[in-house]
Image (cartoon, rainbow, N blue to C red):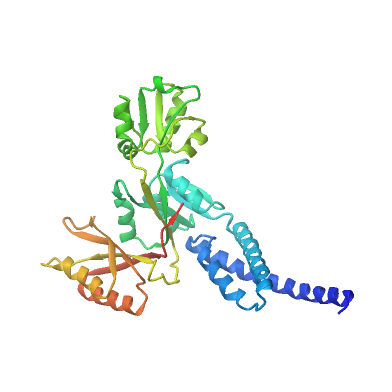
Amino acid sequence: MDLQEARELIAEADAGMAELFIRRMEAVRAIAAYKKERGLPIEDRAQEQRVIERQSGRIEDELLRSYYVQFLQNNMEVSKRWQHRLMEGLRVAYSGVEGAFAHIAATRIFPDGTAKACPSFEEAYDSVVRGENDIAVLPIENSYAGEVGPVLDLMFSGGLYVNAVYDLLVNQNLLAVPGAVMDRIRTVISHPQALSQCAGYIRKRGLISISAPNTAVAAREVAERGDPSVAAIASSETAALYGLSVLDHDINESRTNTTRFAVFSRVENPQSAKKDRGAFLLLFTVKDEVGGLAKAINLVSAYDFNMRVLRSRPMKDLPWHYYFYAEVEGDDRSENGRRMIGALRGACPMVKVAGRYVEAEIL
C-alpha cells in the first residue's frame, strides 16, 4: 500500500467514524435525559471500566490494544462533556440558604445544575412534585445526630423516588469579619447541631453560643453585623460566599461527622442494584399485635437480606402508631427480593420501597 492509498483508507475510515460519532452522541443525549430525569450523576466509573474491558477485548494486538483503550477513554471524556452541556438548566431544590451544607451537597453532586433554595424540607420536596424543580437533594441522616425525621416522613408519605445517596463530610470552621482576631471573639452563632459538634471548642474558650436556623444564616448574620467579637461556625465555602475570614479550621470534635444526602426525583430508576454493594430503602408498618415487628424482621432475614439500618418514626395521623424505615442490602427486584417483598405485604399493613442506590458516594 502506497502513501496515497493509505491516506484514502484513513479518509474513508474517518467518514465512517463521523457518521458513527453522530449516532453515538445521539445515544449520549438520551442517556443525559435519562440521568437528568432521575437525578443520576454523569460520572459512572464502574460502567466506564466495564465498557473498556469489554471493548478492548476486540483488539487482538496487545500493543495496539493499549492505544485503543486511550481512544475509548477519549471518547468517554467527550461524551461526558456533552452530557454536562445537556445537563445545564437542571433545577436542583434544597432546603436552606446559599452556603448551607445542603447547598454545598447540591452543587457538588450537580455542578452543571441550578441550585434552588427552599425554606423547608417539605417545600423542596413538594417543588419537585409540582414540577417546579427537577430533583431535590435532602439530608436523611447525620452520623453525629442521627436520622433527619422530617425527610423520612416525606419519604413515607410522598411519591418521589430516591435514586442516589451521597455522603458529605462535615468540617466546621470559625468564621469572622476580616480583621477579627481570635482573642477578641466572645460570641459564636450557628445551628444547634453545629454548636453541639463544637461544644468542647466553645467551652474551652469560654464563648457564648447563639442558635441560628442553619450555619449559612449564622455566617450571613456575622457578615451583616460587622462585629469583630462575633463569629460563626460554618463551612469554608460559606466564608468565601459572605466575605468572612477563617480564624480556625476543623473545630468540630468528631473527624468522622458525615451527613448523608438523598437525591429525590419523580421517576424511578429501573436499573437494579448490585447485590454485593447495593441497597434499597424499605418503609413498612406492622400489625398491632405481639411480635408484629419481629415477624417483619424475621421475614427479611429469612430471604437472606440484611437490614443495616432500622428506625421507627411516629405516624402523624395515628397517635402512638409507628412506621419503620430500613436500609436493606441487596436488590429487592431479584427473584429472592420479590419473594421477600411479597411475604412482607402479606404480613404488614403497608410496605413501600422508596428507592435504591448502588452505594453511597463520597462528595
When the figure is inspected, residue 71 is found, relative to residue 206, above or below; the finding is below
Residue 39 in sight in this render: yes
Question: Which quadrant of the rendered structure holds the N terminus?
Answer: bottom right
Q: Position of residue 311 (x, y in %)?
A: 25, 57
Residue at 50%, 63% (x, y): give it.
37
Left or right: 349 with respect to 257?
left
Q: Is residue 238 above or below residue 151?
A: above
Eyeballing the image, is 31 above or below 253? below
Would you say 262 lies left or right of 350 here? right
Counting every numbered tag in the picture gives: 0
Residue in the picture at 50% in, 33% down: 242
Q: Position of residue 203 (x, y in %)?
A: 29, 28
Q: Quadrant of residue 164?
A: bottom left
- Image quarter of residue 75: bottom right
From the viewer's perspective, tell me whether residue 237 is left or right of residue 74: left
Location of residue 186 in the rendering, given as x and y in whole percent from the top left corner:
36, 22
Q: Position of residue 65 (x, y in %)?
A: 65, 72
- Residue drawn 58% across the image and 58% down it: 87
Picture layout, residue 211 above or below residue 255: above
Relative depth, front residue between 172 and 93:
172
Q: Residue furthest top?
A: 184
| Residue 117 visible, this orientation | no
Identify which residue, 54 or 264, lies in the foreground. Answer: 54
Residue 282 quadrant: bottom left
